[in-house]
Structures are given as C-alpha cells and as structure tokens.
Image: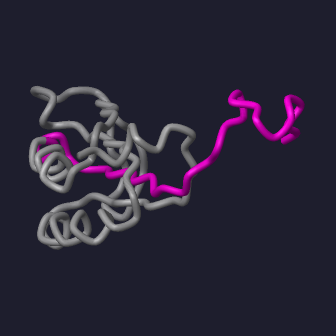
Amino acid sequence: MSNRGGEGDRSMLTLHPMKEIRIVVEGEHLKLVTNLLDRVGATGYTIINNVSGKGHHGFHEGHLLFDDTSSQVIVFTVVPEERIEPILAGLGPLFHKHSGAMFVSDVAVTRRDHFVGQ
C-alpha cells in the first residue's frame, strides 16, 4: 500500500487485528448464540439461515422442514481477541450436547471502533 499524499494523508487506512468467529448451529439454538454474543459485547453479527452441508453428523439440508428452528444457521461476528474465551465458555455446553461447530480466524478491520463496543 502506498501513501501518495505524504505523511499527513488522512485518506490512509489503518488495519487493526481482530478475530472473526463463525458459529454453525441448529436453528433452535440461534437465540442462545445471539444472547451469548450480546452478553460478551459483540457489537453485531450476521445470520445466514437454511445452511446445507456435510459434517460429523452427516449431511444437513438447508430447506425448512417445519420452521426456521429445524435447519442449520451460521452466525458471523468480529470481536477483539479478549472476547474469544467467554464465547468458548458459553458455547462449550451446547457443543457437548448438540451438533455444531465454531471457527475462529484472524482478520483485520479498518474501523476498530465499530467492533469493540462500550
């Protein structure tokens, strides 16, 4: 990345390290996940409903069987690293009893204040 405007160029973006979390759960557990994310201070999340895929418990269809709680969902969020442990602790009991997965990746954001909350 070049800085064409010199040292004082305000158009230059700065990247801040964060963690992206992707949580795959059965729709019936969505409220538990979103409540947990709210409690630990995630400032937002994205939900993708009706997810299809194959995992440890076999193939999961993305279409609704009865209502939106019968299919799988993915919840995406970006948080500072210190919020990972409370999320792991909150999801541990769920994953010990039910199918699902959590993926954590290193990401960088330009607007850190949008992800750290109050």
Looking at this view, is 20 or 108 the one in front?
108
* Quarter containing the N terminus: top right
Count of picture labels: 0
Residue at image position (39%, 54%) is 21
Placement of 49 over or under 116, stated as above or below: above
Q: Please say whether residue 56 is one of the residues in the magenta stretch.
A: no
Q: Nearer the viewer, residue 95 or 81?
A: 81
| x, y percent for residue 91 | 19, 64
Instruction: Measuring from the top left, give residue 102's x and y in whole percent.
Output: 35, 60
Image height of 105 relative to 60, above or below: below
Question: Residue lying furthest front in this view?
Answer: 8
20 is higher (above) or lower (below) than 86 = above
What residue sits 24% from the left and 63% below the top?
87
Answer whether residue 26 is magenta in the image.
Answer: yes
Identified at 15% across, 29% down, the residue is: 68
| Point 40% across, 48% down: residue | 78
In the displayed structure image, the side of residue 52 where residue 26 appears, left or right = left
Q: Is residue 96 left or right of residue 57?
A: left
The location of residue 58, given as percent across then percent down, is 35, 56
Q: Nearer the viewer, residue 55 or 3?
A: 3
Horizontal and vertical percent position of residue 11: 71, 27
Task: Read off the magenta span.
Answer: 1-30
Taking 89 as reference, is 20 left or right? right
Figure quadrant of residue 57: bottom left
